[in-house]
Image: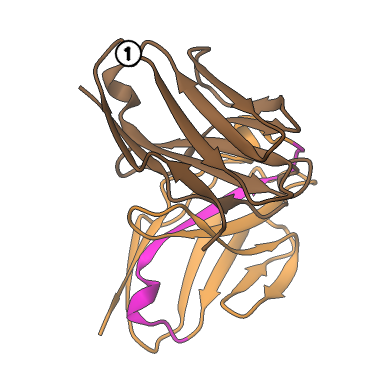
Chain colours: A brown, B orange
Amino acid sequence: ETGVTQSPTHLIKTRGQQVTLRCSSQSGHNTVSWYQQALGQGPQFIFQYYREEENGRGNFPPRFSGLQFPNYSSELNVNALELDDSALYLCASSPGAGAYQETQYFGPGTRLLVL
Amino acid sequence: LAKTTQPISMDSYEGQEVNITCSHNNIATNDYITWYQQFPSQGPRFIIQGYKTKVTNEVASLFIPADRKSSTLSLPRVSLSDTAVYYCLVGGLPGGGADGLTFGKGTHLIIQP
């Protein structure tokens, strides 16, 4: 157990809809990262937040956005869902400022299916 | 871009030592090498991290040659529960961006009785 939780565990949406996924980091972890993992692929970095500010972003369009709150929770919002957004969405927390060499603690993920 | 290359799959047997090698020819001076393990329908789990030479912890060893262009994850005496996907990552910048925090396809390790 990593102490990182995500909700919901599974979600079904239709194309064009919006979705909000939630993550609760380990207490005291200032950095949260979000990843998208398509079936059979490795996780792909979406973005990272440190103390409520975005401090790194992967190759994802602006319709992927996030928030981080002072209580160590965070959200991933995806607008205008597309079929290719179907994936496992993972959040990971780390205690410091998000330096690569810090261990990241992953949650179990939210599996999103877009129809 | 510090891309990584690792075998798509490997098979071994219980009790054997398993070595998974990752190539990262374009590794930068400030890059670390990190390995994660992932079971189906779970998030990845940190295994080990190193910068150079050898690192050992309670579950694995990581061997890094002097040129740092490759690394080898060594799992001693594997069991069936070690069947998983193993990812090699290379990166080092704070925040990382797409380079520092991107996983490849990983190596699917299958352990047989």
Q: Is residue A45 left or right of residue B85?
A: right
Snapshot quadrant of residue B88: bottom right
The residue closer to the viewer here, A114 or B14, is A114
Give x and y (percent) for residue A87.
34, 34
Give x and y (percent) for residue B52.
75, 63
Give x and y (percent) for residue B51.
75, 59
Question: Where A47 falls versus B8 (above or below)?
Answer: above
The chain under label 1 reads A
Q: Which element carries disc 1, helix, strand or loop?
A: loop
Give x and y (percent) for residue A107.
50, 49
Image quarter hosting the C terminus of chain A: top left
Q: Is residue A50 left or right of residue A65?
A: right
To which residue does mark 1 refer?
Answer: A17
Question: Where B103 falls versus B62 (above or below)?
Answer: above
- The type of residue carrying mark 1 is Gln
The residue closer to the viewer here, B54 or A18, is A18
Q: Is residue B44 left or right of residue B69?
A: left
Residue range in magenta is B77-94
Total marks placed: 1
* Residue lying at the far front of the rendered structure: A71
